[in-house]
Image (cartoon, grey):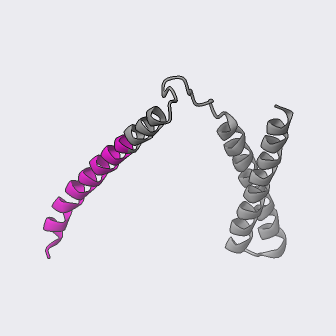
Amino acid sequence: MEPGVIAVFIPIIAITAIAYGVVQWRRYENDERKAMIEKGMDPGSTKRMANTSWALRFGLLFIGAGLGLLCGYMLDSLFRMEEVAYFSMIFIFGGLGLGISYIIEEKKNDSL
């Protein structure tokens, strides 16, 4: 198959997939509302609480990644570890940041 033909099909397939995903998502929401009505619940009264923990999660992840880059640079300059130092430190400190955010969220949920 020629590259020009493939280039035409890629946007068509992508738009079709996105439209299908939106339709399925709306169908799921409608099925969820129907199930709530069948159980006698009011679907309008159950407002979902705003989840503000994403800011904490991403903030600590990026702080951890920044510290990982800094430590990776120090390891690279001291021991000539090159790329291994950067990637390993980013993953280690990013994971530590996510772990700390989990601990903070658990403490916040316990205090409620």
Left or right relative to 89: residue 6: left
As drawn, is 106 to the left or to the right of 29? right
Question: In the figure, residue 2 lies in which quadrant?
Answer: bottom left
The secondary structure that dominates the magenta segment is helix
In the rendering, at what x and y percent does residue 101 appear?
77, 46
Q: Quadrant of the N terminus?
A: bottom left
The residue under the point 83% across, 75% down is 79
Residue 86 lies, in percent from the top left, at: 71, 66
Is residue 15 found inside the magenta-colored segment of the image?
yes
Give percent across and percent down for residue 8: 16, 60
**Residue under the image location 71 percent in, 63 percent down:** 91
Q: Position of residue 33 (x, y in %)?
A: 43, 35
Please say whether residue 74 is one of the residues in the magenta stretch.
no
As drawn, the residue found furthest toward the top would be 45
Please give the name of the residue rendered at 69% of the width and 48% of the height, measured from the top-left corner. 62
Magenta residue span: 1-27
Q: Nearer the viewer, residue 15 or 6?
A: 15
Q: What's the residue at 67%, 44% (across, down)? A: 58
Q: Nearer the viewer, residue 13 or 51?
A: 51
Instruction: Count numbered badges in the picture.
Output: 0
Residue toward you, 106 or 62: 106
Q: Quadrant of the C terminus?
A: top right
